[in-house]
Image (spheres, rainbow, N blue to C red):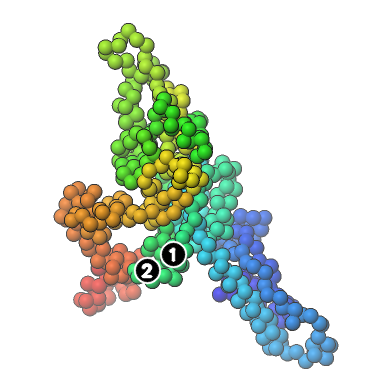
Amino acid sequence: MLRFCHWRFPPSLAAARMLPSPPPLHSNFSGVGANSSSTVGNSKPELLFPQSQPHNLSSSSSSPPSLKSTVAFSNAGAIRQNMATNSQCLSSRQEAIGSDISSLVVVSFYKFADFPDHADLRKPLKDLCEELRVSGGIILAPEGINGSICGSRESVETVLAFIQRDVRLNGLRQVETPVSPEQEAIHHGHSSSSPLAPGEDAPFRWDHVRVKLKKEIVTLGMPSVSPIERVGTYVSPEEWNELISDPETVVIDVRNTYETRIGKFKGAVDPCTTAFRHFPSWVEDQFALKQQGNKTEGVVEKEDKAEKPKTLPRIAMYCTGGIRCEKASSLLLSQGFEEVYHLKGGILKYLEEVPKTESLWEGECFVFDKRVSVEHGLAQGTHKLCYGCKQPISDEDMEAPDYEYGVSCPYCYSKKSEEEKERARARQTQFEEWGVIGGPDKGRRPATKPDSPRKSNEKLGSSI
């Protein structure tokens, strides 16, 4: 436990120094700040957690001891006194840690940037998140970074500051979501509402962070489309209602069907795509685009051959946090659209800032974590997740005959074979029995050598 306070001096030195209070702590990540030179070799960077001030120990230092009493002190007595002082300070530090840890936030962020050496950031970023107990998922690609993480406010801010030390990633676009007290309790394993494992119902797995390397931070499948070069016009949540209320504006929901099914803006066009990479073909079909030399124009209807090519409409797009619209706006600009707008901060920022009484949003917003959906004010939504297909489901969906917990729902039942359903049932049984898919030895080295004799029931248990 003393590692949280980082008191480096050995007992003999402690006795000699007789410090009345421990050295001050810092909230800096030592591999990031000015003291980064103290990190040696490939060892993990050392983290110093933010703490409150120690209790006033004036009783032990209000008046200097007499020379006689000082001489009478033995080394053992000096060590005991210093350990008692340290114990009091550690107690206050732990109380402060407890109060800091209980305040959790979820932050979604992204930044398009020219980032060819993105792979170099993966290990130090993952190490930092693990040390600070920040969970979630982060994608690194040559075009930038995209992620959503959960942790104490101080820890999350430290991670974001570390990322933005690279000038190319400075100025991350961020959307912060508060975490409910119940989710905080579950996150820290202090609630009985999740009997399988701590964090089962928390925004992310409480003990895990994924940092992945990919070709794109959001997959469109068109390398020629570059938001780094040009994007549409950002529209603030306060101005969004006026824009989409204009009958000359075509409002497009850039998300997928399982997202639009539970909520969208009033009057928005749903492309009915199942993946973002299908969006370019939908745009081409919807607006009847064709290539004419180096310029893309609207196709003229056969009966109107004498007329000029039709003018492409004004477009207003939105998505969950803004990243997909930003890339989609770059696509539309490259296709000849001149007026392309997109909601800054996405739906999440709109639900956070625009009062429900003035809102044009209808339904709930799907989010890519265990909250599943959020409402106005980013309050917890009512939808749950089907673990068979990872789609949001309502209370009515769970009453349907096609719904089976952990196996299927009305949206995936007919798409799954009986073999797939049986595998899902086996997976769910493993999770209910062990709290982890794959059984108790999942991710661990076997306790005995593979060639050593084992009882038949042990073999069966390890294979579950």
47 vs 431, left or right, is right
Where does the image place residue 162, in percent across and percent down from the top left?
A: 57, 52
Amino acid type indicated by mark 2: Ser
- Which residue does the image show at 21% across and 76% down from the upper left? 457
Q: Is residue 434 above or below residue 330?
A: below
Label 1 close to label 2 by CB (< 8 Å): yes
Give how far apart the Cα atoms at labels 1 and 2 are: 9 Å
Residue position for label 2 = 193
95 vs 19, left or right, is left
**Element at label 1:** helix
**Element at label 2:** loop
Q: Is residue 68 above or below residue 325?
A: below
Where does the image place residue 336, in percent across and percent down from the top left?
A: 42, 22
Q: Residue furthest top?
A: 306
Q: Is residue 274 above or below residue 280?
A: below
267 vs 322, left or right, is left
- Which residue does the image show at 45% across and 46% down from the upper left? 356
Q: Residues within 10 Å of mark 1 (few under 14, many from 20)?
A: few
Where does the image place residue 207, in percent across and percent down from the top left?
A: 44, 63
- Which residue does the image show at 48% across and 36% down from the upper left? 240
Q: Residue furthest right?
A: 67
